[in-house]
């Protein structure tokens, strides 16, 4: 069987693209690598890309010079976990608190990792996870 190497892109669908853009830039410190009226793309640690699309904005094929992208969309709160270094956990807690973002949950995992859970402006559940969450992480 051919091998999958990694998850390259993760997409979230948002009610207000400008508001979501500001959150992911200002609160999470992500660098935007592509912006247009249809979407935003953010680099995540040089190992993945977070795509933000307006809800309902990609329901038609999207023509590109290399071929059409099939329609896609999503609604309701989704979940994404971002990996962080264990020694960055307290700094992230401080950053979220300073921004007025409530931590909804904290989980200590049997393998030794810790996860913090909070929401973005579209109620997507975001997780910051230290090593020890999964086998191999």
Image: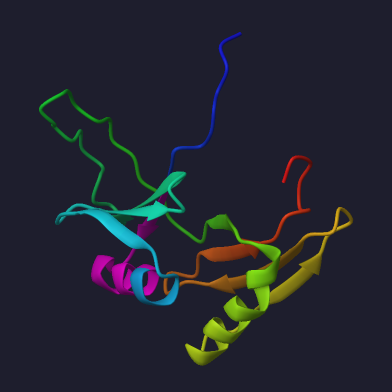
Q: Give the side of residue 71 with respect to residue 94, left or right.
A: left
Q: Which residue lies furthest to the front in this view?
A: 87
> What residue is at 55 percent from the left and 23 percent from the top?
4
Near-viewer residue (73 or 132)? 132
Q: Give the side of residue 101 with respect to residue 129, left or right.
A: left
Provide residue 12's location: percent of width, then percent of height: 41, 54
> What residue is at 43 percent from the left and 69 percent from the top?
122
In the picture shown, does residue 35 fall above or below 114? above
In the picture shown, does residue 90 fall above or below 28? below
Provide residue 92's location: percent of width, then percent of height: 58, 76
Provide residue 126's location: percent of width, then percent of height: 56, 64
> What residue is at 64 percent from the left and 62 percent from the top?
85
In the picture shown, does residue 75 fall above or below 114? above
Q: Residue furthest right?
A: 110
Near-viewer residue (47 or 108)? 47
Near-viewer residue (67 or 6)? 6
- Where, by quadrant of the figure, is residue 102 drawn? bottom right
> What residue is at 57 percent from the left and 17 percent from the top?
3
Q: What stretch is highlighted in magenta?
A: 11-24
Q: Give the side of residue 77 with respect to residue 61, left or right.
A: right
Quarter holding the N terminus is top right
Residue 133, magenta (yes or no):
no
Residue 17, magenta (yes or no):
yes
Q: Which residue lies furthest to the top in this view?
A: 1
Q: Which residue lies furthest to the left in this view?
A: 65
């Amino acid at each position: 069987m051919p091998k999958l190497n990694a998850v390259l892109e993760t997409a979230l669908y948002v009610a207000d693209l400008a508001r979501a853009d500001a959150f992911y830039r200002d609160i999470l410190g992500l660098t935007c690598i592509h912006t247009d009226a249809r979407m935003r793309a953010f680099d995540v640690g040089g190992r993945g890309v977070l795509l933000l699309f307006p809800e309902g904005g990609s329901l038609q094929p999207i023509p590109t010079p290399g071929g059409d992208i099939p329609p896609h969309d999503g609604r309701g709160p989704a979940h994404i976990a971002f990996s962080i270094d264990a020694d960055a956990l307290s700094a992230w807690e401080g950053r979220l608190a300073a921004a007025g973002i409530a931590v909804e949950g904290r989980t200590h995992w049997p393998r030794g990792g810790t996860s913090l859970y909070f929401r973005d402006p579209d109620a997507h559940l975001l997780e910051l996870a230290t090593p020890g969450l999964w086998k191999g992480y």
